[in-house]
Image (cartoon, rainbow, N blue to C red):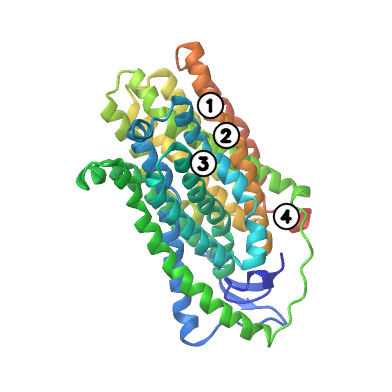
Amino acid sequence: MADDDLATLGPAAGPRTTSTDPADGPQHPQPGPGHAAPAAGPAGRWLPRLVIAGLVLAALNLRPAITSLGALLEEVRAGLGMSGTVAGLLTSVPALCFAAFGIAAPRLARRWGPGAIVCAGMAAITVGVVARPYLGGTGGFLAASALALAGIAVSNVLMPVVIKSWFPGRVGSMTGLYSMALALGTSLAAALTVPMTEALGGSWRTGLAVWGALAAVAVLPWLVVVRQRRALAGAAASTAARPPEAPVRITSSPTAWALAVFFGLQATAAYITMGWMPQIFRDAGVSAGTAGVLLAVTMAMGVPLSFVLPRLATRMRHQGPLVVLLGLCGLAGYTGLWLAPAAGAWAWALLMGVSNCAFPLALTMIGMRSTSSAGVVKLSAFAQSVGYLISIPGPLLVGTLYQHSGGWGLPIALMAGLMVPQIAVGVLAGRDRRIEDEA
């Protein structure tokens, strides 16, 4: 995908050279020879701020459709007459949809531009979240959920390219802001859905649908950004020629594969933690209420760390040491869950929260492993789609081992065992390489 395919979003066309600021890498994009300068005038001042607002609002909406359902799943099952099998399928659908729809993001972005697709993604989340409680049956609920998840999937993939296009010298800080907002949206939906449902009359339909209001707000800044960027892109096209970029064969890049497997294994660990950690604590004698709070603590750890970690990663030529540190925290947490799950519950929850911050690190490395926005969108789609496919069996396998072994020894051993290859491929993905040099 050439840079002109990204013109509806990026502030300037074509490759960029950068000046370096030690605080966060390159800061100020400069147009390369023969390329248009970034937009000047009033639009050049307020439009980047609007993009930041759009990033934050989009990130806040990328998980509530999932975590709000988890909080009310029992009520949804009863209200729709949903079987246990179908309810179990609902917990696996997000990863499957992320993989299936995410792979289409580059093609859609090439045709319409990333900004327009993110805008459409927010609209799809709005419609899906609002409609699914009121469509009358399980089939309609699943279809509307798939629509919302499709919007989440394409937005997941395109967020790194938005950051790379608009803020090429601030990948760390902007990825941190985006990741922090994503973690905040996840935690807020998990914590507020039940009390908000009670405050709105107790109907699970209202409790799910109300999150569509937040998604509707996220559509607005992207409408303005897309409209303004198309006007500026047309002006830039009349004054600047863009040489074609060499095509990137993403499947020929060892770094792309390492990053995809790393993304998949960290997603596996995150889904296992969210799905099974409270049950581990409850089986160890911890009360249900405390087990829920422990999970909330684990998720909340991602809010501050997701802001700090990407900034730190961009200052390093090799992100391997961070991968190892997060992996060791995960191994320590699993060891604690095996030896003394109740006695050290708070410590294990904190360690697992630190380990789960492999997600913002993976997003940061996606932005750093390509020289262009076109390469980033291809790498993002590949790494996330392959990664989410890898993550699907993990939670199901843990449940199977738990059911047949009658305890948590084998499942925890599996979790710890998966952390070893996660560290190995993460170190490979963290090397100072670019996919254009390998493919």
Q: Secondary structure at mark 4?
A: helix
Distance of mark 2 from mark 1, alpha carbons? 8 Å
Q: Is residue 41 above or below residue 419?
A: below
Instruction: Name the residue type under label 2.
Output: Ile
Kindly identify which numbered label has been placed on residue 350.
none
x, y percentage for residue 233?
Answer: 61, 80
Q: Earlier in the sequence, mark 3 or mark 4?
A: 3
Distance of mark 3 from mark 2, alpha carbons? 9 Å
Which residue does the numbered mark 1 point to in the structure image? 396
* 10 Å crowding of disc 4: few (<14), some (14-19), many (20+): many
* 10 Å crowding of disc 2: few (<14), some (14-19), many (20+): many
Distance of mark 2 from mark 4, alpha carbons? 26 Å
Which residue does the numbered mark 3 point to in the structure image? 94
Instruction: Name the residue type under label 1.
Output: Leu
Residue 17 placement, left or right of 210? right
Quarter-wise, where is residue 114 in the image?
bottom right
Q: Is residue 306 above or below residue 244?
A: above
Which residue does the numbered mark 4 point to in the structure image? 435
Which residue does the numbered mark 2 point to in the structure image? 392
Q: Are marks 2 and 1 in contact (CB under 8 Å)?
A: yes
x, y percentage for residue 395?
Answer: 51, 29
Kindly identify the residue that appears in the image at 63 percent across and 63 percent down.
109
Q: Secondary structure at mark 3?
A: helix
Instruction: Name the residue type under label 3.
Output: Pro
x, y percentage for residue 197?
Answer: 26, 44
Q: Nearer the viewer, residue 189 or 12?
A: 189
